[in-house]
Every structure is written in structure tokens, then in C-alpha cells.
Image: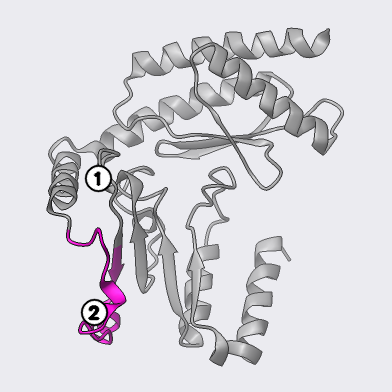
Amino acid sequence: MTASHNILNEIEEYLQKNGDSVAAILFEPIQGAAGFIIPPEGFLASLVEIAKKYNIVTICDEIQTGVCRTGSFYYINQIKINPDIILLGKSLAGGYYPLSAVIAKRKLFESVDFNKPGFDSTFANNLLALNIANRVIDYIHEENLYKKVAETGELFLSELKKMEKFPFIQDVDGIGMAFSYRVQSLSGSPKESVKLAKLIRKQCFSNHLIIQTAGVHGNYMKLAPSLLVTPQEIRNIFNKFNSTLEEVVDIIAD
């Protein structure tokens, strides 16, 4: 039995005993802060089915994956699941203005008493933010950004996989324009792996490449390029990244 099946079994066992005290199951369809970790095929569909079985609300956090980042407006479009609530933010207004959104099934919104302050906020109903978001969404459809993200994403991932020639770059993965890889020190020490990840980040920054460390232990690297990045820019990025990793090899060899 796989680890994902064990997790699902544990969740169901818990809900069998404690389902009445569970308000909702909140999940990221792809773990963001963990380093764009993509779950096994079928895992989220099974999770939603289990929640539905015990009448538990499911909340899908698409704040990092939504608005075309993975090649569809929501990542759940690609894996065909139907949660009760979807959360959006960050890229919803193209990074120009702070904005978030809660999209829920009608029955949930209709259960809320709008005479109470549940949806009240100092920044609620900001017309400028909403106008920017509408224009971002229009642009995505007008330019067929879904197709562009799929095509350039494949190129980016193929170039990133070439970096696995360096023994400390492992588990390269990605979808759309969301990518990650794990840094593994040659000694295998977790502490040394984190130290090496920080060194790679530092050398990248020195060469005008911004790469973010992520993961529970800080030894994952995540990359979220602009959705408008061009093939030539991708090649330039990886020319720099390759030379940067060669610098890292020289540093750790000293």
C-alpha cells in the first residue's frame, strides 16, 4: 500500500470517529510552500470523495496554483475534482493590486446571513482591484494564455531536467509554469542539504537569478516564472543557471 493510500485511510478513520466535529478539509491541490509538490494521481479525487461521504466541506486553496499558473484557470480543472469552496489571491489581480476571492457553491453562500459582518472588511468591494482582476482574466482568454503556458512550461521543464546532471539536483518536477527540485548534498546529510540549498540561492542571486528555497526542511527550490516568459528568455535563464551551478561545484570542491 502506498503512502498516499495510508494517508487517505487515516483521514477516513478519523472522520468515522470525529466527523461531527470537523468543519472542513482545507488543502492545496499542489503544495506551494513545500516546493510545488504535486500529489499522486487520484489522491485529491479520493480525498474529496471521502469528505463528501461524511458530509464535510472541502476548501481548495488555489492561491498559488490558480489563474493559469498550471495551464488552466484552476488546477482542479486538470484533475477534475469539484470542491465546495475555492480560494484565490495574489495573481488574481496580476500582482498589481492586493485582491483575494472566495468562490463557493450556491448553497453555502445562501446559508450566510449577509446582515451580519461575516463578509465585511475595510478593503471589501474595492472597485479598482476588481477592475484589474477582470482585465487580467480577459487578457488570459484573449491571448489564449493556457496554450502559451503549456508550451513554454514544457520547454522550461525540459531545460530544468537537464540540470539533473549535477548530482545535488534531484526530483525535478513541474506543471504549467510551476516548478521545483530537491537539493541533496553529496553526503546525504539533511543539514548539509539545507546549507547547499542556501548556497545555490545565494549564487543565483549574485547572477541575477531569483530562486526561492522551500520545503519543510528548506532543501527544496521552487520556481514560478512569469507566464509571459519567452523561449529565448528561458534559454538565457538556463545558460545562467548552468554556469551558476558550475560555480557551486567549484565552491563545494574547495
Q: Which residue is mark 1?
A: 93
- 199 or 19, which is in the foreground? 199
Q: Is residue 16 above or below residue 147?
A: below
Say what amino acid the circle numbered 2 marks. Arg
Return the x and y of residue 142 as percentages of the image width and height.
Answer: 12, 39
- Closest to the camera, between mark 1 and mark 2, is 1
Q: Residue at x 17, y 61 (%)?
A: 125
Say what amino acid the circle numbered 1 marks. Ala
Return the x and y of residue 94 as percentages of the image width and height.
Answer: 26, 40
Residue 70: image quadrant is: top left
Mark 1 vs mark 2: which is more N-terminal? 1
On residue 106, which mark appears? 2
Q: Is 63 placed left or right of 218 in the picture?
A: left
Q: Is 218 placed left or right of 21 in the picture?
A: right
Number of other residues with Cα within 10 Å of mark 1, as a class: few under 14, some 14 to 19, many 20 or more: many
Q: Is 96 placed left or right of 166 in the picture?
A: left
Q: Is residue 49 visible?
A: yes
| Residue 108 highlighted magenta (yes or no) | yes
